[in-house]
């Protein structure tokens, strides 16, 4: 069931980003939003490089190879979802509207769905995750 919920969370996140694009908010010429989106892309790349050659799974699925606690994972448990949310929320801040905020909330809810599912599954595979979670924040350091 957790894997199904995590796929739903991914669909919600993708839908929210598409929605932001469709209403003309996702890409903007506002310098602060561009700067934050560049930081988000940098965090995403750093996270993927740190995570290594493990593949991306549509469903929450702990991968073999041990718990990753280096790089951005030293500070936050979910830097990839943090990067996606930052990428989506950066232009919302400079283009506030009911529609953009609603889509931003959907983006965050989709990410939270995935994070909670992943955490529960990772705890089963890596019991040391419990201690790791005590010393890192989920998204915001």
Image (tube, rainbow, N blue to C red):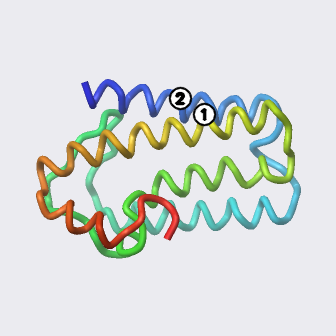
Q: Is 68 on the left-hand or right-hand side of 72?
A: left
Whole-percent x, y for residue 7 in the image: 38, 28
Return the residue at label 1.
106
- Give the quarter of the image for residue 117: top left
Which residue lies at the image location 35% right of the left edge and 27% below the top edge? 5
**Which of the two labelled residues, at mark 1 and mark 2, occupies the earlier sequence position?**
2
Q: Residue at x 64, y 36 (%)?
A: 17
Q: Secondary structure at mark 2?
A: helix
Q: Residue furthest front?
A: 134
Estimate the x, y position of residue 15 in percent, counting from the top left.
Answer: 59, 28
Determine the image quadrant of residue 118.
top left
- Mark 2, Cα crowd under 10 Å, few <14 / some 14-19 / many 20+, is many
Give the left or right position of residue 140, taking residue 67 as reference. Answer: right
Query: How far separated are the C-alphas under marks 1 and 2?
Result: 7 Å
Density class for disc 1 (Cα within 10 Å; few <14, some 14-19, many ≥20) is some
Q: Is residue 46 above or below residue 89?
A: below
- Tell me, for residue 73, which label it has, or none: none
Residue at image x 28%, y 48%? Answer: 119
At 31% across and 75% down in the image, what residue appears?
Answer: 70
Name the disc covering residue 12, or none: 2
Answer whether labels 1 and 2 touch (C-beta < 8 Å).
yes
**Pair 1/2: label in front:** 1
Measured from the top left, where is residue 18 in percent x and y? 66, 31
Q: Residue 69 at x, y = what percent?
A: 28, 71
- Quadrant into which the N terminus falls: top left
Foreground of the two, 5 or 84: 5
For the image, the number of numbered tags is: 2
Q: Secondary structure at mark 1?
A: helix
Q: Is residue 103 above or below residue 94?
A: above
Depth check, front residue: 41 or 9: 9
Residue 92 placement, left or right of 48: right
């Amino acid at each position: 069931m957790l894997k199904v919920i995590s796929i739903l969370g991914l669909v919600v996140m993708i839908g929210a980003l598409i929605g932001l694009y469709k209403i003309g908010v996702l890409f903007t010429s506002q310098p602060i939003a561009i700067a934050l989106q560049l930081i988000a892309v940098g965090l995403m790349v750093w996270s993927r490089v740190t995570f290594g050659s493990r593949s991306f799974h549509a469903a929450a699925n702990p991968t073999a190879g041990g718990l990753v606690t280096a790089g951005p994972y030293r500070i936050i448990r979910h830097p990839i979802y943090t990067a996606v949310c930052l990428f989506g929320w950066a232009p919302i801040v400079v283009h506030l509207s009911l529609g953009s905020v609603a889509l931003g909330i959907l983006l965050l809810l989709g990410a939270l769905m995935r994070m909670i599912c992943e955490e529960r599954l990772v705890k089963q595979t890596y019991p040391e995750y419990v201690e790791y979670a005590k010393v890192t924040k989920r998204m915001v350091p």
